[in-house]
Image: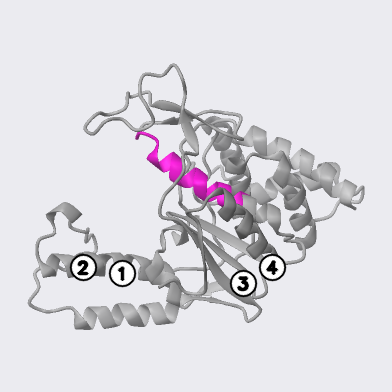
């Protein structure tokens, strides 16, 4: 069976490589499956990518055509990992892995929203519960009311995301050369530390976070372009953007914002890629969600392979830290 899965994984990886070639190839595939919907790079991609995996299974799998089982899917993804660069593979993994082993306590989050609303000082002019409430710019915060307002807006944003969470989630895809991003149909990529206490897992699983406070250079300024990785303060990149190259990725990236987002997202995806490499997801649970300055992992309580993978990563990236359970 291993040879069969390897064969299907090769066909699957080739299809994924072609799919992510450009914005147009993504749009063409999307519209072929959802002709009545406007093209969207966030919604419905779990279904699109699973459909591609199923097509590869029917094309290169057993002679008797059937739907791939859950184990078939796990085996194909496992064999596809070394065939795709870490930017593409993690987008595929995010849209194929299951999220049923984790859930957010939506009821508790709603109670917290109600409590905050009840306790918000009536004399304050700022209203964090207004439909379009936006945080005061940090440089302009000058009063206790503004500070509490910002804190409340941030907390409410996370709590509202939690109240809407379901295991049916689709993650944003980015074509080759485009700046990748943290985004998904349920916004769970945006949940910060304040959401930790609402995350629950099944009894055999545990929550882990790999965190960092600085990001190494993952993408490098391409020689011959006119600006360095980070333009000087007040200097905007050219309209066409700045071209970056990254180790292990065979295509360049173009950024119009100076490259900061590329560094953060690629680092999180690299950590995710290496953790997956050290796990055997056909035998153990490993659910991952990359975020700003952290990677959420839901794994077995006795996650020996995860701990071993982290130790190897720590040697290469000393800024990494592993937190088991809720972060402080």
Q: Is residue 41 visible?
A: no
Q: Secondary structure at mark 1?
A: helix
Q: Residues within 10 Å of mark 2 (few under 14, many from 20)?
A: many
- x 40%, y 67%: residue: 193
Instruction: Please say if 292 is above or below 30.
Output: below
Whether the residues at callouts 3 and 4 have beta carbons within 8 Å, the answer is no
Quarter of the picture containing the C terminus is bottom left
Whether the residues at callouts 3 and 2 have beta carbons within 8 Å, the answer is no
Crowding at mark 1 (Cα within 10 Å: few <14, some 14-19, many 20+): many
1 or 3: tag closer to the N-terminus: 3
Disc 2 to disc 1, how far (Cα)? Answer: 8 Å
**Magenta stretch bounds:** 257-273
Q: Are marks 4 and 1 in contact (CB under 8 Å)?
A: no
Q: Residue at x 37, y 26 (%)?
A: 228
Q: Which residue is mark 3?
A: 101
Res. 311 mark: none
Percent of width and height locating residue 202: 61, 78
Dot 4 or dot 1, earlier in sequence: 1
Residue carrying label 4:
304
The CA distance from mark 4 to mark 2 is 44 Å
Q: Which residue is mark 2?
A: 128
Check disc 1 and report the residue beneath it. Answer: 156
Q: Is residue 88 left or right of residue 257?
A: right
The answer to the question of whether label 2 and label 1 lie on touching residues, with beta carbons closer than 8 A, is yes
Q: Secondary structure at mark 3?
A: loop
């Amino acid at each position: 069976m291993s040879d069969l899965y390897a064969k299907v994984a090769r066909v699957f990886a080739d299809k994924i490589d072609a799919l992510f070639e450009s914005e147009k190839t993504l749009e063409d595939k999307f519209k072929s499956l959802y002709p009545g919907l406007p093209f969207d790079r966030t919604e419905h991609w779990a279904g699109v990518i699973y459909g591609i995996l199923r097509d590869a299974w029917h094309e290169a799998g057993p002679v008797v055509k059937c739907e791939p089982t859950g184990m078939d899917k796990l085996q194909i993804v496992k064999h596809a990992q070394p065939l795709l660069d870490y930017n593409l593979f993690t987008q595929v993994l995010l849209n194929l892995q299951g999220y049923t082993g984790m859930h957010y306590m939506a009821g508790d989050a709603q109670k917290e929203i109600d409590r905050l609303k009840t306790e918000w000082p009536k004399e304050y002019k700022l209203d964090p519960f207004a439909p379009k409430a936006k945080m005061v710019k940090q440089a302009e915060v000058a009063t206790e009311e503004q500070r509490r307002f910002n804190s409340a807006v941030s907390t409410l944003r996370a709590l509202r995301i939690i109240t809407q969470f379901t295991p049916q989630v689709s993650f944003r895809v980015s074509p080759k050369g485009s700046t990748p991003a943290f985004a998904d149909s349920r916004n769970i990529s945006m949940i910060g530390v304040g959401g930790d206490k609402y995350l629950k897992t099944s009894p055999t699983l545990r929550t882990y976070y790999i965190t960092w406070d600085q990001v190494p250079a993952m993408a490098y300024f391409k020689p011959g372009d006119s600006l360095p990785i980070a333009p000087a303060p007040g200097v905007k990149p050219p309209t066409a953007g700045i071209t970056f190259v990254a180790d292990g990725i065979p295509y360049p990236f173009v950024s119009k914002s100076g490259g900061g987002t590329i560094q953060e997202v690629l680092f999180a995806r690299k950590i995710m890629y290496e953790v997956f490499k050290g796990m055997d997801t056909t035998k153990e649970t490993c659910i991952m969600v990359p975020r700003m300055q952290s990677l959420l992992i839901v794994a077995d309580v006795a996650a020996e392979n995860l701990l071993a993978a982290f130790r190897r990563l720590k040697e290469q990236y000393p800024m990494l830290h592993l937190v088991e359970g809720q972060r402080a």
